[in-house]
Amino acid sequence: MKYNRILVRYGEISTKGRNRKKFTSQLRENILEALKDLPSISVNASRDRLHILLGEADGEEVITRLSSIFGIQSFSPVVMTGRDVDEMMEAGLALVQKSFEPGKTFKVSARRGDKTFHLDTNELNYQIGSYILKNMEDLTVDVRNPDIKLNVEVRKEGVYLSSEIYPGATGMPVGASGKAMLMLSGGIDSPVAGYLTMKRGVEVDAVHFHSPPFTSERAKQKVIDLSKKLSAFSGKVNLHIVPFTAIQQLIHDQVPENYTMTSTRRMMLRITDMIREKHEGLAIVTGESLGQVASQTLESMQAINDVTNTPVLRPLIAMDKLEIIDIAQKIDTHDISILPYEDCCTIFTPPAPKTRPKREKVQYYESFVNFDELILEAVEKTEIMQIDGSSHKEENFDELL
């Protein structure tokens, strides 16, 4: 069966008032971006629903891609027919046959958007339903709780029939809530934080700190692949790879061992904030979960946050590790995150990092070192990669071994 279009239902967007058009327009742009390589696609967005006109595109391929686009509550592939009842019956039969398994029940739910149509809803339900029953064995009617619900909507331009409802990714369209910089390590937490931030409509740029020779090219490729997974939800992700070796080595040499982690995170936050300002971001996102590690106590967060006035978003702050792992598995980042390639957050880790660092002490230790020039140099030498599912080639980690 060839679908003509896909009907997209809004979720949270429907609660918006006068600014709803801003969100529907952003969703339309995101859908077009996700389907840009498919021929003859067009998208019409109205206040209450959105239609994707398929043309010659493969409807099954479009269905697969729509499932990861934020801002969609649900969607249904639709067959459009003329207003001829025989044509409607044939299309309805084909749709029910596609979803049928022995023992399933069905009902027809007709709606006349055009009241001038010569049959009323009860007559439409009867004619289409009886035709389907005559042509299918082992199928029964259940008007209260059917397994298959065939929706038939009669409008002036034609008749729309659908029988399947696919769940969407919900949330808000990416880009509708501004842009933020995600501090992306190679671990489990930060990709999940990026995913949850995008779900609230925020466009995400990733910032990764690379410290060769202490961190390998495999670790860098790991972050590229994580960015690619995230790009499935936003169309693309700009990845900023910061050369961090000189700064990290200086911290290791000059700052007391139990404060090196605190100072390292402070320098990372300073650099991320400068990249944010340069690329017109509004916030910084981290994968911190309260109390999970030494740098994620309230005292540590206060000492680290001291270097910026920019809002720092922590979507995972109240989650435990198992909850975070569940989401990582759902978004297909978990298996990449657990690959054994160290990032700069794990090298030089002191045996007993300070869990309650004093802001005044870390400021004092850093005052003996001029970090400003090294920070500016790191920002200037930052490599920027645009990652998306269609243009960036995924590497096979086995080939790198």
Image: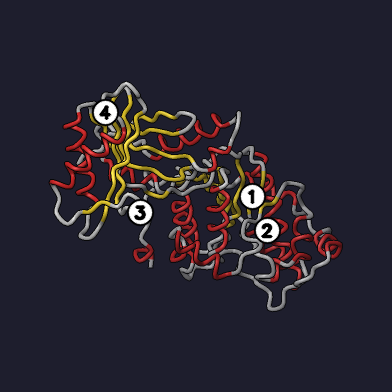
> Of tags 4 and 1, which is closer to the observer?
4
> Of tags 4 and 2, which is closer to the observer?
4
In primary-sequence order, the first of circles 3 and 4 is 4
Residue shown at the point (62%, 39%) measured from the top left = 279
**Is disc 2 surrounded by few (<14), some (14 to 19) or many (20+) residues within 10 Å?**
some
Do the CB atoms of the residues marked 4 and 2 lie less than 8 Å apart? no
- The quadrant holding residue 153 is top left
Between 305 and 75, which is closer to the camera in this rendering?
75
Reading the image, the residue beneath label 3 is 145
Of the 4 image quadrants, the one containing the N terminus is: top left
Q: Is residue 236 visible?
A: no
Position of 96 with respect to 210 (left or right) is left
Question: Distance from label 3 to label 4 (Cα)?
Answer: 25 Å
In primary-sequence order, the first of circles 4 and 2 is 4
Q: Secondary structure at mark 1?
A: helix
Kind of residue at disc 3: Asn
Position of 188 with respect to 283 (left or right) is left
Q: Secondary structure at mark 3?
A: loop
Reading the image, the residue beneath label 4 is 119
Give the number of marks. 4
Q: Using the image, tell me which numbered label, if any, was put on residue 247.
A: 2
Kind of residue at disc 1: Ala
Reading the image, the residue beneath label 1 is 378
- The quadrant holding residue 78 is top left
Question: Distance from label 3 to label 2 (Cα)?
Answer: 64 Å
Q: Is residue 331 visible?
A: yes
Residue 146 position, x and y percent, is: 32, 52
Residue 60 position, x and y percent, is: 28, 45
Position of 356 with respect to 219 (left or right) is right
